[in-house]
Image (cartoon, rainbow, N blue to C red):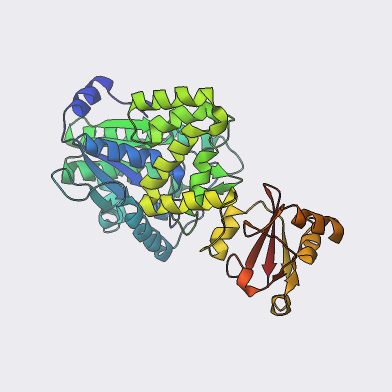
Amino acid sequence: MIEQVSNEEALDRLFASSGAAVYVGFDPTADSLHVGHLLPVLLLSRLQRMGHRPIVLVGGATGMIGDPSGKGSERILLTPETVARNVEAMRRQLSKFMSFEGPNAAIMVDNGDWIRPMSHLEWLRDVGKYFTVNYMLAKESVRRRLEDREHGISYTEFSYMLLQAYDFLHLFDQYGCTVQAGGSDQWGNITAGIDLVRKVRAREVYGVTLPLLSTSSGEKFGKSEGNAIWLDPERTTPYRFYQFWVRTDDVDVERYLKLFTFEDVQSIVEVCAAHDKHRERREAQKLLAARVTEIVHGKDGLDQAVRASEFLFGKELSGLNDKELSEIFADVPSLGMPRRILALGLKLIDALVQVGACATKGEATRLIKSGGVYVNNRRASSDVLLTEADMASESTLVLRTGKKNYHLIRFE
């Protein structure tokens, strides 16, 4: 999980014992975290299991500005109301991953609580004087933006580094926090905090970064067809979340099992060795999907995802709503029809021709007689009349010919 450390020998000693306070910051740029945030979240969870104290910082202040690290252009500034709403949503999500009770209980803080009360003059005097402009220009995140003549970097984003550095100092003073962790793009901000604590308190604190993941094909991790995979089930259903992990490439699956689950290393090696003998079964991917889905969405979310997956492979459809059904059959062709047709009844043969599953009524008749037609994954034995009673969800009916040739009819 580790890419960079500021002092390897000291961190080895620190993590080998217990009781260290370690913080990771999350800016509330959206009302949900996504899978790109999972690595630092799980790092905190692992460290708590080892006896250390996690500090989760939600950036109520830094979220108002936006971190330029890893960004090619200026972020759109959020309103205070949006930031406050996002902060609250992130608080609820992050509380799933670690315990906020017990001897090494996690702490959740908002940097808006200590940054907002400071005046600009106080900020310049108490923080700004410890940093030269030369020092800030030397940071990779700043230098890359300065070289981009089209976008450049605003004074607002240029100052972000100092805000994050001050967070480290505040958490050191208030909670004895001696380690900050984050993605590898945070290295410049983390080392600025290390320098500030050293200059102001004459103490050494430490930094740890995690790799920014990409798939074996070079795609950005956590993106699926251009869309982020969110941890909020309202934004990414447990089924779609589960399927994201099931689709993991064979080349990536062992690494992801080590990074994103709490399986012991020997078990992972054994699972992957068995997987290599029968890759078509995707057993390693299914284990990965099950473990991560349960961590994020709980046992109920995992059960929901597995049940939805079974529907795609022929289980009789029941108990689904339109949204769940749309997620399961996202890539299936669909046809819209007026709902009033169902009042009189729609002949199955006519439906098969209209959706394009069969070219002619004769072909549809023969297919039904041979047992190759299914309504909501139930085999149709005759040319039945389809009515409201045959709906798979509020407004959708599912037709299947053969093993996997699906068509949807959406009644509007």
- Toward the viewer: 217 or 134? 217
- Toward the viewer: 260 or 412? 412
Residue 406 visible within the image: yes
The C terminus - image quarter: bottom right
- Toward the viewer: 94 or 14? 94
Determine the image quadrant of residue 352.
bottom right
The N terminus - image quarter: top left
Residue at the image point whose x is 58% and y is 70% from the top: 394
| Residue with the most extreme left position | 103
Question: How many tags in the picture?
Answer: 0
Determine the image quadrant of residue 379.
bottom right
Give the side of residue 156 with respect to residue 107, left or right. right
Give the side of residue 61 with respect to residue 371, left or right. left
- Residue 144 at x, y = what percent? 52, 34
Residue at the image point whose x is 52% and y is 39% from the top: 246
| Residue with the most extreme top position | 9
Give the side of residue 277 with respect to residue 187, left or right. right
- Residue 319 at x, y = what percent? 51, 64
- Residue 219 at x, y = what percent? 58, 35
- Toward the viewer: 48 or 146? 48
Question: In the picture shown, does residue 64 fall above or below 21?
Answer: below
Give the side of residue 270 with respect to residue 120, left or right. right
- Residue 249 at x, y = what percent? 55, 32
Residue at the image point whose x is 60% and y is 46% from the top: 226
